[in-house]
Amino acid sequence: MSDIWPLIPAAIYLLFFFMLVMIALVTLSVTEGDLFPTFEPLQAILKNTEFYDALINTLIFVIIGTPLELIAGLFAALLVYNSFWGKTFIRSVFVIPFAFPGLVIATLLFILFDSQGGFANHLLQGQYSFFPKVIDHDVAWRGNKFLALSVSMLGKVWRDMPISMLIILSGLNSIEPELIDAAKTMGAGFRARLTKIILPLVFPAMTTVLLLRSVEMWKEFIFPYILAGNYPLLGTLIEKLYGFGSEPGEAAVVALILVGLTVLTLILIVEITGRIKRELVNSGVNS
Amino acid sequence: MADLVLKNIQKSYGNHPVIHGLDLHIKSGEFVTLLGPSGCGKTTLLRMIAGLEKIDSGELWIGGKPMQGLPAQKRPIGMVFQSYALFPHMNVKNNITFGLKIQKMEEHAIFSKLDWVIPLLGLEGLENRLPKEISGGQRQRVALARALVLDPEVLLLDEPLSNLDAALRELAMDELKRIHQEVGKTIIYVSHNQAEAMTMSQRIAVLNKGHLEQYAEPMRLYDEPASRFTAEFIGSPIANSYVGKLGTHDGLPVVQTAVGIIRISDRCMGHVSSAPKEIRVCIRPQDIHQLKNQVLTPYCSVFRVLPSLIETPGDRCLVIGKTNSGEAVRFFVDRVHTVVVGEPLDVFVSAEHVHLFNSENGKNILGEQI
């Protein structure tokens, strides 16, 4: 019985910050004005085309953004992992975006990608000597769904990539140097060492990145809110319904769907990565 | 022929030299140990042979081919690391076949290699286990199997037995000797354990602070140490060591020490006049015997010892005592002999077992070749 006491703080934390919030959310999702319980908010959401748009936009964000962040983090970590002159400087440069709040980075991108003028347009119009002219007229970065979501996704990936990089870097640093040396003495060149030894050994860290970043991508708010206001994601739709639309019940339904989809994604990632891991152990000569 | 030749090999880390112009010739099929204390440069030397460390200057030849500038993956070597360095995400079979798959060997050839090496190293039934699921001894054998299947010209072993317990280490030493006899590969073995080196090697290269102290057969190292370092490093317990002066007594060569006048080999006669004033005398505890009823030759020297400590490790007793002058003397007696602490006894040593070294450079004054 005495073993339970150390768990009490965690239990209190879960009760207040998860259980009570979830109960309040579920209650809100089946409340419409004075009506309780009711499925009216759910029915309204299922009829709302904006919800489906937001769902697809968020799905694209997750499907493209999560691996993009993993790949960016992996390449940055591999670069920093190898010894070279200026390694510390490069690592600091990579980590800088994370030192600023997301809102600041999003606002910065808002200014850079301004639809009238703006650095990006000036650059592509050849106004800087170091870059060739690509376009004649200003591009409306926020007036096009593809561009608006792309810029917000790139902003998100750029700003949060240091987390992926640091997680993968810690995985890389935990690889015993003798394993790499052993692979060398067995004839493995750089590519074979990377694909057969380094990546499989850093796979647990990559799985962690996928899990953490997929959650982040599902619930992303600030970048699409600032940079793609006309093209909602589930995160921004919740705010829109709750704030401007004064539909807290519908906002709660979308929030619950978001939670469900996040959990489903996590289960899927755990399942897929588990299979890959088993495959890695058993791959080779079949006898 | 896979002779391995090192010519004037030098290596520094920053301003700190770790290998000083080392020369070594290892014959094809030979089992050679690089022996020395921690930090003497033996692992660095092995890693330079493997191509894992850059050689600052000098030449390295394997099988008549120069190896400088050749990366590790292109050298005809196999290596077993101290930690075994088994790939934790691969089972035993995949660990063993990793190098073969890198070479793009055909599957049937890989199977034949597995069929050869698995019984050779007693790994039957472990093929599908992960490294974490097998014992230390089994890991060591997997690491060896992994290197052997590559059919390297030279097999490099970096203290592969140091993680095993004493009993397992003895078994592994026998195994290594058997495998060497069966496969006939050139083996370079790194160890700080002189018992391992003496048991397994055909020749031993004794290293000290990046210098080659002596390169010879184990018995020669033991009987004719070329330097004081070798005399003290080879053999256990450590050799008795005294300061002395060369001279003659009744026309015979002797060395005068605090222990007494010790008769030395006639071969030293020529050095008596030319030898430095002060020399270092080393006598192994195994070469000092208790005087009972033996008939002593003129080459024997006798001195009295007062035992202060007696250790009984097993078949015989190690006696630690002091002479009248207070010099410590370590020697062995049979277990059946009664030696009592505090009761003086006479011991003797034969001239051929008295090793003499230059006090300044530590070299054997008889100039034994290294």
Image (spheres, coloured by chain):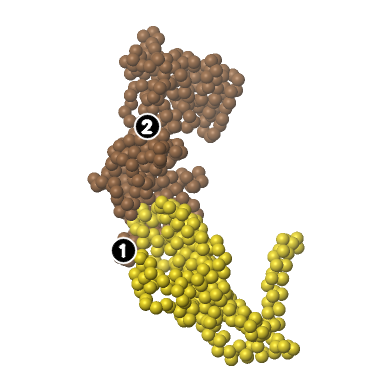
Chain colours: A yellow, B brown
Give how far across and how far down residue B238 sits, in percent: 48, 29
Front-most of residues A238 and B136: A238
Give how far across and how far down residue A185 sits, in percent: 36, 53
Q: Residue A111: in sight, yes or no?
A: yes
Q: Which disc number belongs to residue B104?
A: 1
Alpha-carbon span between mark 2 and mark 1: 43 Å
Relative horizontal placement of residue B338, taking residue B252 as reference (left or right): right
In what element is the residue under mark 2?
Answer: strand
Q: Bin the neighbour count of mark 1 within 10 Å (Cα to Cα): few under 14, some 14-19, many 20 and up.
A: few
Give how far across and how far down residue A187 sits, in percent: 34, 56
Callout 1: residue from which chain?
Answer: B
- Residue pictured at 49% horizontal, 15% vertical: B258
Going by the numbered disc 2, the residue's amino acid type is Glu
- Residue pictured at 55% horizontal, 67% vertical: A104
Give how far across and how far down residue A149 sits, in percent: 49, 77
Comes first in the chain, label 2 or label 1: 1
Mark 2–mark 1 contact, CB under 8 Å? no
Identify the residue position indicated by label 2 in the image: B213
Q: Residue A199: in sight, yes or no?
A: no
Callout 2: residue from which chain?
Answer: B
Front-most of residues A131 and B201: A131
In the rendered image, which quarter is residue A229 located in? bottom right
- Residue furthest top in the image: B250
Q: Bin the neighbour count of mark 2 within 10 Å (Cα to Cα): few under 14, some 14-19, many 20 and up.
A: many
Going by the numbered disc 1, the residue's amino acid type is Lys
In the rendered image, which quarter is residue A13 located in? bottom right
Q: Is residue B226 above or below residue B265?
A: below
> Which image quarter is the N terminus of chain A in?
bottom right
- Residue pictured at 52% horizontal, 78% vertical: A228
Q: Is residue A197 above or below residue A118?
A: above
Relative horizontal placement of residue A183, taking residue A163 as reference (left or right): left
- Residue pictured at 37% horizontal, 61% vertical: A192
